[in-house]
Image: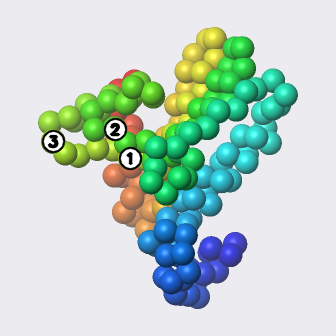
Amino acid sequence: MLIKNAFDYKFDFDGELNLFNIKKLSELYEIYNLHQLVQGLKLKLNLDYFKIRKSTTRIDNIIDYQAFESNDYKVEMFYEPKYPCSNLKTHLIRIDCSVNGTYYCPDYLIQITTPAKTTILILDSKYTKLYTIKSTYINDCMFKYLSLIHI
């Protein structure tokens, strides 16, 4: 709610966000959503049965990988996983690799592995109004993440 109010009232947090190495309010929104997703997983999983691993490869030390593992189940959460043509951790493969120097980078990727199957959820945060998401972003995201990725 606080982030929505900041958008509605057009507050300028540029100086304060720079203290946290955040360039835009949309980045703060992404990090907030990352925290909410991880907390939701922790709330829904019985953590007594899961080993938790986390790591980062980022300069800003934001955790970009978190795994909840048990004997039979594994839930992996990736933050901004970049893959130019393929990603060995997620087994995602881009179909349109002909453009050199480009990559896909959804905000979040959740991979759930059970003995029966693997499910991948690709999520992309947009800090904007619902109308803009529907009119501008949704078609692009659907095309990139549904049409141009092979698992």
Q: Which three-letter amino acid code belongs to the residue tagged 2?
A: Tyr
Give yes or no for contact between labels 2 and 1 (Cβ–Cβ under 8 Å).
yes
Q: Nearer the viewer, residue 71 or 124?
A: 71
- Going 81% across and 24% down the picture, which residue do you hit? 49
In this rendering, the answer to whether 143 lies above or below 138 is: above
Per the image, label 1 sits on a secondary structure element best described as loop
| Tag 1 residue | 105
Specify the quadrant of the image occupied by residue 11: bottom right
- In three-dimensional space, the C-alpha distance between marks 2 and 1, rounded to whole angstroms, equals 7 Å
Vertical relation: 115 (above or below) 56: above
Spatial CA span between label 3 and label 2:
12 Å
Could you tell me which residue is drawn at 57 percent across and 47 percent down?
63
Residue 106 appears at what percent x and percent y?
A: 43, 47
Q: Which residue is mark 3?
A: 100
**In the image, is 106 to the left or to the right of 8?**
left
Disc 3 vs disc 1: Cβ atoms closer than 8 Å? no
Observer-nearest of 103 and 144:
103
Mark 1, residues whose alpha carbon is within 10 Å: few (<14), some, or many (≥20)? Answer: some
Inspect the image, locate mark 3, and give the three-letter code of the amino acid beneath it.
Answer: Asn
Residue ID at (43%, 42%): 81
- In the shown orientation, is residue 120 left or right of residue 81? right
Q: How far apart in space, not on screen, are marks 3 and 1 (Cα)? A: 15 Å
- Residue 109, above or below 127: above
Reading the chain from its start, which is encountered first: label 2 or label 1? 2
Residue 13 in which image quadrant: bottom right
Q: Residue at x 55, y 26 (%)?
A: 119
> Which quadrant of the structure image shows residue 16?
bottom right
Q: Where's the N terminus, which quadrant?
A: bottom right
Q: In what element is the residue under mark 2?
A: loop
Residue holding disc 2: 83
